[in-house]
Amino acid sequence: MATAPRQSSIISSGQWRNNKTPLISRASEVLRGYPRASCSFIGSIHDARRASGLLDNQHNFAQETSVEVYEATRTERMRQFALDEASGIEYLRKIRQDRTPSDPVLRILFCQLEEAKGGTSFNYRVSLSSNFAKQLLKTFDITPQFTGALLGEPDYWAPGDFASLDEQGNIQRLEFCCQQPRWAIHRKGAPWCIYMAHSFSSNCTTYILVCDAQQTRFDIVKERLSDILNADRKTWTALSDSIDPFFLHLLITHEVFLDAVPSITKLRHQLYDSLDRVDRYAETAAGGRKRSELEELTIQLHVVSQETDRMSANVEMSSMIVQRLLRAHERYRGNVDEVGKRDSVVKTDDALRYLAESIESQKRWLNSYKSRKDIAMNLVFNLVTQQDSATGTTIAREAKADGSAMRVIATMTMVFLPGTFMSSVFGMAMLDNARWWLYVALTIPLTLLVISIWLIWQKSERLSQLARRLTRKLHKEGKDCVV
């Protein structure tokens, strides 16, 4: 018979097991183009045939391209425009032709993922056509590490931090890609997937942002970008951190962590409610405690434990991303010689360190929640043990009382059993003329004989038990002496 899912669970049992295994077909051969020809290709960690197989799966892509683009320079206000298939191909062609250094520019491409399970590799379809996606990867020479994330692949690995050097051994280009943790894990959706590339020769930073259309912080990120990049150029110095290549990584990490605040607050309230219930239960007199309430407390603390472990894992992931951002920014900082960029570099570094310490602070709070949860669960376990011990003591006391009553009944039976037996004998027809004193003369000695035999048997059992205990003791002492 099927078992109904537990009502206290936030996720119904078997929900994730129903997800199909990712459909990834490897290419039959490695072509000379992307990804093998990418300057960011690292053969030890990048599988060219796997990446080519993902790009060859037409189900992973939309029929028509739909991309939103933000562009900003030091001299002009931000340009915001949308690209379709034709305009997108033309846009990439102009970028390939314009390879000359220009004013510092920030280019951001927003792509969206929609859920689609018909032959897709990761149950998502990106808002790019197959042709545009391949040209996009080739035009910006994007690291193959980002190919799966572009298509909605869950990434449980570390962020990608890669550098390309020129012939003189100087860093020519920096790349950083990561997938932010998803705090609302009980709501299906794709997390933020972020790619950044900065070219030292053109002083241009390119971002590709991929996320679910239902991403809660998507519109807020765009609003903050518009507020920053549409600022008056005369006040640009007040926003100098925005020309740092890592500022958008930092902004999105900040927003994702702010998205975790409601989940952490809800967890804290659940924990405090559970602790209050445990305290009230512990203060209740033993006779007024209900077993069903104790079971509810155990289940509630189990749910809190699951949520705490999940959030701790997300905080660890956020901390790892920020630490990798710090190391990548240190690499960038070591290659910046322009005096005009020092202010933005220092501000971004300060912001990264502030965010890293903030995440560490939340980690300490979560560790405190886990400790308090463990203490509450130990108290509940002890209460259960005490209640079970009290129940066992009551049962033993009742059993002892029953045993004493049975002993009295057995004694009375042995006293009256010989008299009952003799009355049955004297009730026979052949003894109708027997005198009554004969019954008394036979019954009393027989009763005394039966009681004597019973007492001797009890005494022998006790002596036998004492002898066995003494033998075991002597045997144990003998072993100890030998040792």
Image: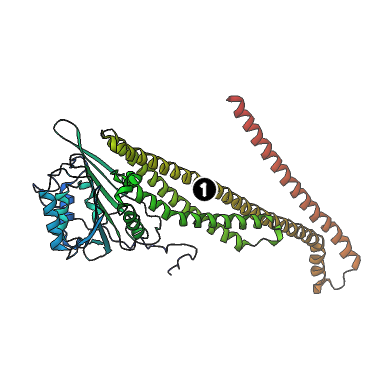
Depth order, front residue of 461/436:
461
| Quadrant containing the N terminus in the rendered view | bottom left
Q: Amino acid at mark 1?
A: Lys
Depth order, front residue of 3/37:
37
Residue at far top of view: 482
Relative to 22, 396 lies left or right: right
Q: How many marks?
A: 1
Residue 244 horizontal/vertical position (percent): 30, 43
Depth order, front residue of 299/109:
109
Does 113 sit above or below residue 358? below
Identify residue for label 1. Answer: 370
Relative to 370, 320 lies left or right: left
Secondary structure at numbered mark 1? helix
How crowded pointer 1 is (Cα within 10 Å; few <14, some 14-19, many 20+) is rated as some
Residue 87 horizontal/vertical position (percent): 14, 61
| Quadrant containing the C terminus in the rendered view | top right
- Identify which residue is drawn at 41% across, 42% down: 356
| Residue 349 seen by the camera | yes
Q: Can you tell which quarter of the image residue 151 is in?
A: bottom left
Residue 11 horizontal/vertical position (percent): 42, 62
Residue at far front of view: 234
| Residue 25 seen by the camera | no
Residue 314 horizontal/vertical position (percent): 40, 49
Tell me the colour scheme of the image: rainbow
- Identify which residue is drawn at 90% across, 68% down: 436
Residue at far left of view: 32
